[in-house]
Image (cartoon, rainbow, N blue to C red):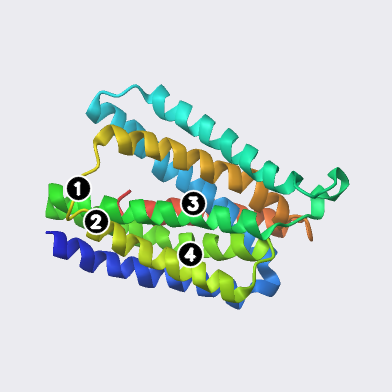
Amino acid sequence: MSLTAILFSLATFVSTFAGGLISIRFKDRLHYVMAFTAGVLLGVVTFDILPEIFELAKDGGFDPIDAMIALAVSFLVFHLLEKAVLIHHTHEGDYAHHHHPNVGMFSALALIGHSFMDGIGIGLGFQVDMSVGIVVAIAVIAHDFTDGMNTVTLMLTHKNTAKRAKTFLLMDAVAPVLGAASTLFFTLPPYALFVYLGVFAGFLLYIGVSDILPEAHSRESSYRMIALTVFGTAFAFFAIKFAGG
């Protein structure tokens, strides 16, 4: 079972890397990619992560408010950390157009951590049952394409070089494989996964509504940009439903 999980995780490597390369290829039109990405983030949170939280709460007898507290705390902590970086050596009037490479790297590292947990999810799914593992793997493969896009988008938005963005993309692509391999040595308690999903939901909401979406509209705010965000949300919905999420 574990070997099968690792083999499936290799498909996430391809999916993640492909999504990131698309963002690099079209970096001159990055604001369009960001408008789409913001919609994808909204869709992933509402159609994938939150339903999974409520399902885990039901199956494990957990109080859903615990995950919602984790979501709110995650949102506020990331807000604090980002503003602490931006405030350093920056005047208040510069905020609207200020981009700090460290913010992009911090955000990308958070996504890499999530990708690692995706791999763990694949491994744990196969520990339960072959059919469960396959469903989880397909879901991860589907949304890791957008994880690759998000990683590169965050790096380039904050003025990191394309070379550095590719390095972080490679780290993001490898992370699920390492995560799946790690389940050979341990299992993740259900409650820990439950709280983790709340934390990650808060992170995605923060970067979507306060970072990526405002930046997407900084050059052009139009119905076309809004349509891309709507399309991104719809894309996430159908990708998750198709994957069995």
User: Quarter of the image holding residue 11?
Assistant: bottom left
Q: Which residue is mark 3?
A: 110
User: CA gap, disc 3 to disc 2?
Assistant: 18 Å
As shown in the figure, which amino acid type bears the numbered disc 3?
A: Ala
User: CA gap, disc 1 to disc 2?
Assistant: 7 Å
As shown in the figure, which amino acid type bears the numbered disc 1?
A: Phe
Residue located at (30% from left, 62% from top): 178
Front label number (4 vs 3): 3
Residue located at (56% from left, 53% from top): 106
Q: Which residue is mark 1?
A: 186
* Labels 1 and 2 touching (C-beta < 8 A): yes
Q: Is disc 3 placed on a helix, strand or loop?
A: helix
219 relative to 17, above or below: above
Q: Earlier in the sequence, mark 3 or mark 1?
A: 3
Crowdedness near tag 1: few (<14), some (14–19) or many (≥20) residues, C-alpha within 10 Å = few
Q: Is disc 2 placed on a helix, strand or loop?
A: helix
Is residue 185 visible in the rendered image? The answer is: yes
Q: Which residue is mark 4?
A: 148
Q: Which residue is mark 2?
A: 182
Q: Position of residue 238 (x, y in %)?
A: 42, 54
Return the residue nearer the eye: 185 or 173. 185
